[in-house]
Amino acid sequence: MQGPSRDRDVALVLSGGNALGAYHAGVVDMLQARAIRPNWVVGASMGAITGALIVGNPPEERITRLRQFWDAATQQTGLGGPAGLKPRQYANALHALLALAWGRPGLFRHRLPGLWSALPWIPNDIALFDHAPLRNTLNRLVDFERLNAGDIRFTVATVDVATGEEVYFDTRRDTIRPEHLLASAAILPAFPPVEVDGQLLCDSGYTNNLPLDPLFAPAPERDLLCIASDLFGLEAPRPASLDAVLERANDLIFASAGRRAIAGLSREYALREQLDPQGPTVTLLHLAHKAGADQLAAKSVDFSPSSIRDRWEAGVRDMTLGADWLTAGPEGSGRFLYRRI
């Protein structure tokens, strides 16, 4: 498959999920290998950062930049990935605790007073961590002049802290700077909201972690292939421990808005088909990351080498299945075709 034809746009939508974002890198790795070239990238939080690494670099350097980003983010403790489920869970938990205790160079660090502000004699604070190191990483790995040049349309999702309204920045009308990406990655209360052009903005994860909306407002005027890479899945085995219950709650919080958006699109296009059967079609390939049994409730701050590797490989594997489905020709008819992998 050779990417967008004259009659079809190809969009890539990337959700948030912090350390889970290595899955996105695997998806992009396989997109590059299959020569599927999006002409529009929409991202939230880590999805926006991944999108910037894609749009802000030439095609031949994108995978290299993604590897540089994740190599720097990975927590090299020398523990590796021990064999056996329980040892791997303990290793993952230790890496998550170390990330919370010491931060991740190039991504975030502790701020003061931060958590100490909970004490009665300490001044108030509004966040636990400072993500200023991420600004330096973005300036090093992203060419913002290329990003804003318009070769690939790029949209960043945020939320206005004061109003709760979703705010999107788009290279068709805005000049996207590092602060837009920092705002998109400012999940409360871990990171402080970021003021951009007079608005105080934060991560959209709690409200719309898989930002499909910009693609359909207004409705596409041409056929659209949308590849949505989702870092949280709704389906999982029944939880059998307190940690598994916490993980399940986390997944439900971050994945439910995407499910509702897709259900709404299905209903909308059923009506559109009745009004105009020959109108533009939408093919939605939904890749939902399925965390392994070794992953814990703190998986989004688990930067262990084995977890980062497994997530990248999972992205490659799922996108391979998705690309095969696209190459074979999606079954079914109508103006809205959907496949979840």
Image (tube, rainbow, N blue to C red):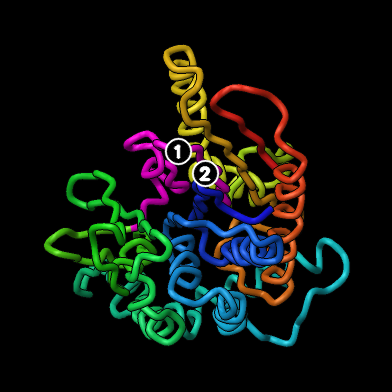
Q: Which residue is pictured at 18% across the width and 50% down the height?
A: 162
Q: Is residue 32 above or below residue 239?
A: below
Q: Residue furthest front?
A: 6
Quadrant housing the C terminus: top right
Q: Is residue 133 above or below residue 256?
A: below
- Disc 2 target residue: 8
In the rendered structure, which amino acid carries the disc numbered 2?
Arg
- Work out whether residue 98 can be spotted: no
- Work out whether residue 339 can be spotted: yes
Q: Label 1's element?
A: loop
- Disc 1 target residue: 222
Q: Return the x and y of residue 121 as percentages of the image width and height.
A: 21, 73
- The magenta region covers 203-229
- Counting residues from the N terminus, which is met first, the one under dot 2 or under dot 1? 2
Give left or right: position of 61 versus 118.
Answer: right
Q: Nearer the viewer, residue 192 or 145?
A: 145
Q: Check residue 290 for magenta coloring.
A: no
Q: Return the x and y of residue 44 as percentages of the image width and height.
A: 42, 56
Give the quadrant of residue 197.
bottom left
Q: Label 2's element?
A: strand
